[in-house]
Image (cartoon, rainbow, N blue to C red):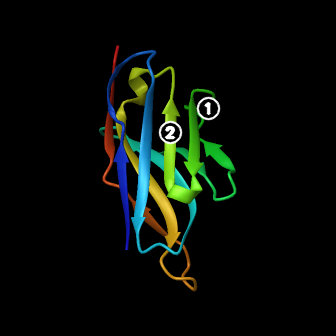
Amino acid sequence: QVQLVESGGGLVQAGGSLRLSCAASGSIFSINAMGWYRQAPGKQRELVATITSGGSTNYGDSVKDRFTISRDGAKSVVYLQMNSLNPEDAAVYYCKADAKIRAWDYPRPYWGQGTQVTVSS
């Protein structure tokens, strides 16, 4: 199977920056898109950013121009650089990968356990 391990969350003051990392491991044949989603208390999980194996990116409206997603394909690692953080960015951030464990599989979504981001005002 596929395991995703996130790191880099924590407490930061408003206006500050954090960098999240997510490493994929396991019996992986290939990974298509990878991305980050977040969920704040009482709210639905929402898209933060995604990146395809070809490097195309997509961002949620609330994070455009502040967050940057990148990927090290060789290492199956995805990063999220978060700048100009504000209290509305506080949430549990989840990593997601659409991966195949065999060549003939359709890509399936796999999720990490999440990492907490707290932003103090």
Q: Nearer the viewer, residue 111 or 38?
A: 111
- SS at circle 1: loop
Looking at the image, residue 80 sits to the left or right of residue 53; the answer is: left
Looking at the image, which residue is at 48% across and 47% down?
36
Q: Position of residue 93 (x, y in %)?
A: 38, 43
Callout 1, which amino acid?
A: Lys
Which quadrant of the rendered structure holds the N terminus? Answer: bottom left
Residue at the spot of label 2: 80
Looking at the image, which residue is at 69% across and 50% down?
56
- SS at circle 2: strand
Callout 2, which amino acid?
A: Leu
How crowded is the residue under tag 2: few (<14 C-alpha within 10 Å), some, or many (20+)?
Answer: many
Looking at the image, residue 70 sits to the left or right of residue 116; the answer is: right
Q: Position of residue 100 (x, y in %)?
A: 52, 75
Q: Which label lies toward us, 1 or 2?
A: 2
Residue at the spot of label 1: 64
